[in-house]
Image (tube, grey):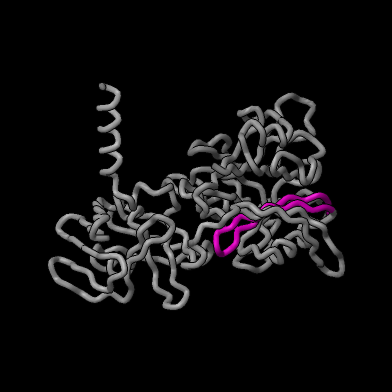
Amino acid sequence: MLKRSILILLLAFICLIPPAFAAPPSRDMVIMDAQSNHSFVSVRFLNGFDGNQVQWNEAAKRIEITRNDVHISMTLGQKTANIKDHSIPLQDAPFKDNGSVYVPLQPISKEFGYQLEWLKESNAVKVSSNSSFSVLPVVTRSAGKQEGCPIISEKKTFKVGGRSFSVQMITISLMNPKVQMDVVLAGNKPGMVEDLSSIAKRSSAAVAINGTFFDAYTSGSYKAPYGYIMSKGDIKMSSSGDQRVIFTYDENQFVRLIAGSDFQDKHGQGLIEGGLQAGPRLVVDGKVSLNVKKEGFKDPKILTGGGARSALGITKDHKLILLTTGGATIPQLAEIMRQTGAYQAMNLDGGASSGLYYNGKYLTTPGRKISNALVIKVQ
């Protein structure tokens, strides 16, 4: 009898959870309507941001958003809102997508006094108030749909300057809520090395690629990784003053490439959950852009040589491209990444370290144990 009472109480509690928040986890994002060019934000994001309180009335399909003395009421599918007890027309009606409720961003930002800044480089919007801010990726309304398979593996050929390069390429849909990233150290501490496949398996990863440069040729047991390494909000390795590019991601799996000199500031703002530093940068805003010496590289293998390469790219619609190829110079690798559709791209450690693991096996087998890896998990 006691067990039955507990079960009844538990079911009653579950029924009190608003469906808009009880739905499967989703990414916080701004959805842009491709036809009207108007933007929408999820009530999941608004709930708690800048002190907002959001209530969802399932029966009436109504959203109530309150902060201090400002109260906004909207209803799914209706182009009117009640603001401070006055009814006003809306250009767009709130809608529901993949279990999340979205409301027009413009009237929200106007009434609550939010500043909106479009970040072209990362295709995102910075939403700022007097007390807080957040950076949200922007996707088109059609791109907001969850894909059946968040990971696609392909073997492709790209032509660069009369040469053909065979590549192994994996594309990950970062806005799919099942996808989670992590940066994993060999042996879980700096200075150790481990097989890429071993790192992937013990991390329960679907995908893994080698990460930062490290001292692979020392005779000592400590093989120092070079550059920043960060995982689960903790800095595992520091590299103050280093200009080389860093791949970063936040708790929302929103990814960016930043200069090493910007790392401490971004980290201090709470914008980085994990990341790794390598370089050089290959593609900026969809165009090949190389400034190898400015990033501090002096090794001929980077400046002029060719060899096995690993790289990552970010598309405008927030997909992550992981790629390996052989025999390419850095300029050739940059052109390959541009052809993949990467809007931003960077080089990772290469040579014998270059490796790509997917679905339990190697697509590219490294020639040595490695220091660290970027891994992708699918929940």
The image quadrant where one finds the C terminus is top right
Residue 317 visible to the viewer: yes
Residue at horizontal 30 percent and vertical 52 percent from the top: 47
> Where residue 375 sits: x, y (%)?
62, 42
> Where residue 60 sits: x, y (%)?
23, 60
Q: Quadrant of residue 304?
A: bottom right
> Where residue 38 sits: x, y (%)?
39, 73
Task: Say left or right for 59 vs 161.
Answer: left
Residue at horizontal 22 percent and vertical 69 percent from the top: 81
Closer to the camera, 32 or 231?
A: 32
Q: Looking at the image, which residue sits at the far front?
A: 1
Magenta span covers which residues? 306-326
Closer to the camera, 210 or 215?
A: 210
Residue 258 visible to the viewer: no
Task: Say left or right for 168 vs 375.
Answer: right
Task: Say left or right for 88 vs 160.
Answer: left
**Is residue 310 located in the magenta-colored stretch of the structure?**
yes
Residue at horizontal 53 percent and vertical 64 percent from the top: 121
Q: Relative to 9, does residue 129 appear above or below in the rendering?
A: below
> Where residue 71 sits: x, y (%)?
18, 60
